[in-house]
Image (spheres, grey):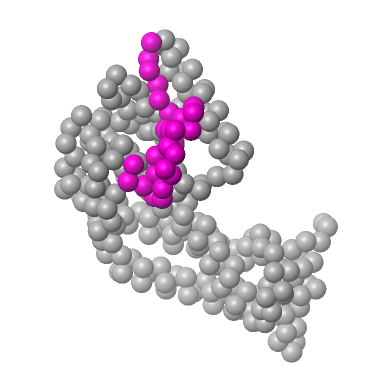
Amino acid sequence: MKKLDPEDVLNYVEENIGTFHQKRIQSLDKLKLSKVLRRKNPYLFKAKYVLTSEKIVRGLTDAHISSSEETIFGDWLEGLAIFINNKVYGGYKSGITGIDLEFDSNNTRYIVAVKSGPNWGNNPQIKKMAADFKTAKRTLRTSNSNLNVVAVNGCCYGRDNRPDKGDYFKYCGQRFWEFISGESDLYTEIVEPLGHKAKEKNDVFIEAYSQVLNKFTKEFADTYCKEDGKIDWDKLVRYNSAKK
């Protein structure tokens, strides 16, 4: 185990945080109104008395962005976690299905599935992770039957004060960052560098976001509004839900 150099973390974040912002914009560029209209509940908009194209489009777009950003940033944090662990324990990106990080410490091989937050999955998804852990343990013990393997579900933020889940451990927030780095305060220290050029990057994103809103609003009004400007709910619901 080596002592983590804060400068290494600072440099990594500043050099790589731009990737997160680039992927946010790429996600917007790929977005199609026809696809998001199929994903959302049109009855909900009617029940909430939504009367304008812009409000419907903004709701659809914002829902997509929220979900997309969580995934994109979760992947980015996974990369940061692997980088930090490599500096301290020599850990590496695992090649085993369902496992993100492997490293050795105190005669133990740790296998880690990194998730964004504690409420990342439903019951089938959690069962799938547990099954992946069992498969990974069998795989690793094939070459070394005496290998002590411990599985960990690591969550980059949040809390879980009952980390022992039986077949694996769940470390969230401070517990997770300390587990992979040996540093109890790392979870707060990584906040500041994440803001590197954040305003500059976000200004570019806001411009792209505004263009998407304008484009989608026009497209929605042209397709799903009547001549008098009212939303054609019948046409919208048919597009969303009718049999082919």
Q: Is residue 4 left or right of residue 137?
A: left
Q: Position of residue 138 (x, y in %)?
A: 49, 17
Q: Nearer the viewer, residue 53 or 154?
A: 154
In magenta stretch: residue 132: no
Q: Residue at x 51, y 47 (%)?
A: 120
Quarter occupied by the C terminus: bottom right
Residue 57 appears in which quarter of the rendering?
bottom right
Q: Position of residue 129 (x, y in %)?
A: 53, 34
Q: Nearer the viewer, residue 12 or 102?
A: 102
Q: Which residues are magenta?
A: 146-175
Q: Residue at x 33, y 21 (%)?
A: 108
Q: Residue at x 39, y 58 (%)?
A: 22
Relative height, residue 105 to residue 7 (above, below):
above
Quarter occupied by the N terminus: top left
Q: Is residue 219 visible?
A: no
Q: Is residue 222 left or right of residue 171?
A: right
Residue 80 appears in which quarter of the rendering?
top left
Q: Nearer the viewer, residue 42 or 243?
A: 42
Q: Residue furthest right?
A: 243
Q: Position of residue 100 (x, y in %)?
A: 41, 35
In magenta stretch: residue 172: yes
Relative height, residue 85 to residue 133 (above, below):
below
Q: Position of residue 23 (x, y in %)?
A: 42, 56
Q: Residue at x 49, y 28 (%)?
A: 166
Relative height, residue 108 to residue 232 (above, below):
above
